[in-house]
Amino acid sequence: MAGIAQEVQADTAFGTDLYLKLAATGNVVLSPASIAAALRMALAGARGDTAAELAAALHVAGPDEAAEGLAQLAAIRPGDDLTFLAPNIMWLEKALAVRDDYAARLSGTVSVRRCDFSRAPEAARQAINAAVTEQTAGKVTGLVPPGAIDSLTRMVLTNAVYLNALWVSQFPASGTRQQPFYPERSAPAPVSLMHLQARLAYHRGDGYQAVLLPYRGGSLAMAVVLPDGPLSELAGRLRGLGGLGGLLAGLLPGAQCLVDLGLPRFRVDAGFMLQDTLHALGVRAAFTGAADFSGITGDDPLHIGAVVHKAYVDVGEKGTEAAAATGVAFVALGMARRPRPDVTLVVDRPFLFAIVETGSGLPLFLGQFTRPPR
């Protein structure tokens, strides 16, 4: 259990780092677990400074621990009313020889497919994108953009995460109505605000309130974190509050009260090229000719040419559909009287959200909603 806890803490810390780099303004969604999974596959074959920089960014000790987080993600199981998928694929140039110890380290959590990158890179790109689209029920399309794969590409590592889940306590459609939402530094905008009264895990923290909405059929839930003031101020204090893990710590024990909740119905999608973000987090050698991925192959030296990520979340009265994918390309060179609620929480201003595995706190999706789309 200690190893599992360490890997979850690592992905939570990495998710905090990513959020603070990527969610400066606007509506954002990303999957820390997906990005970490793809980079962990790379770290498993990294050596020297390349491994040290990747490990530091991922908050893990080194290549030997890289695969443990993949097992944690793979251990999440679907159930009744809950669809959950998290496949990892290693797309290899058909002639590339992978070291036996690298393949063994990833066996059981990563499948292998061969491509003809050298002679048909565009066909390989389309095959990768088609697989990701299928794995995410059509929600993530065009993950690998044109030009990201060429005849020098030797390997692409992909992870996809897909969730389709119903709330344990659904929002009655009759309670949804147009109400104002108050973005920072701009005029109010109308939003479809859902309403629910239910017993939910609730936490009053230092400058914020948080509530946990569980999904049926498993151990997954959505945390909604509403700051007392501007979301930007909460983000500025996030590290001092213990990061994402600190925000979730008060919720996951599950102490419940009767909550009268108003929550926007919302949909957010986003896409990122992560090279600059990872460079800012200290991952430098992996993108240069000095990269050392000799633990993967003894053939052509490899370095990372691109890291791409897309994510999507759709939250409504019945539940949530969310999808994300990451690719790392390696190149060679009612009327009844209701009881009085203990808490009334109206989420009518910018807020942070996270979909987590409640047993461990593993962050599957993370984002913010700052204003309704125009």
Image (spheres, grey):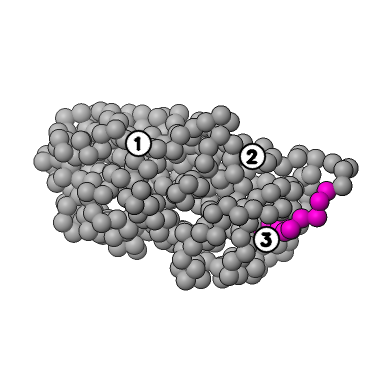
Tell me the element at label 1: strand
Give the CA distance from mark 2 to mark 3: 25 Å
> Is residue 368 visible in the rendered structure shown here?
no
Which quadrant of the structure image shows residue 316? top right
Q: Is residue 291 visible?
A: yes
The alpha-carbon separation of the residues under discs 1 and 2 comes to: 29 Å
What residue would you read off at disc 1?
88
Q: Which residues are magenta?
A: 338-350
Q: Residue 109's quadrant in the figure? A: top left
Q: Which residue is mark 2?
A: 168
Q: Is residue 171 left or right of residue 240?
A: right
Q: Are marks 2 and 3 in contact (CB under 8 Å)?
A: no
Outermost residue to the left: 298
Q: Nearer the viewer, residue 167 or 323?
A: 167
Q: Which element type, helix, strand or loop, lies under badge 3?
A: loop
**Residue at mark 1 to residue at mark 3: CA–CA distance:** 36 Å
Amino acid bearing label 2? Val
Q: Which amino acid does the dot numbered 1 rest on?
A: Asn
What residue would you read off at disc 3? 349
Label 1 vs 3, first from the N-terminus: 1
Left or right: residue 209 versus residue 270 is: right
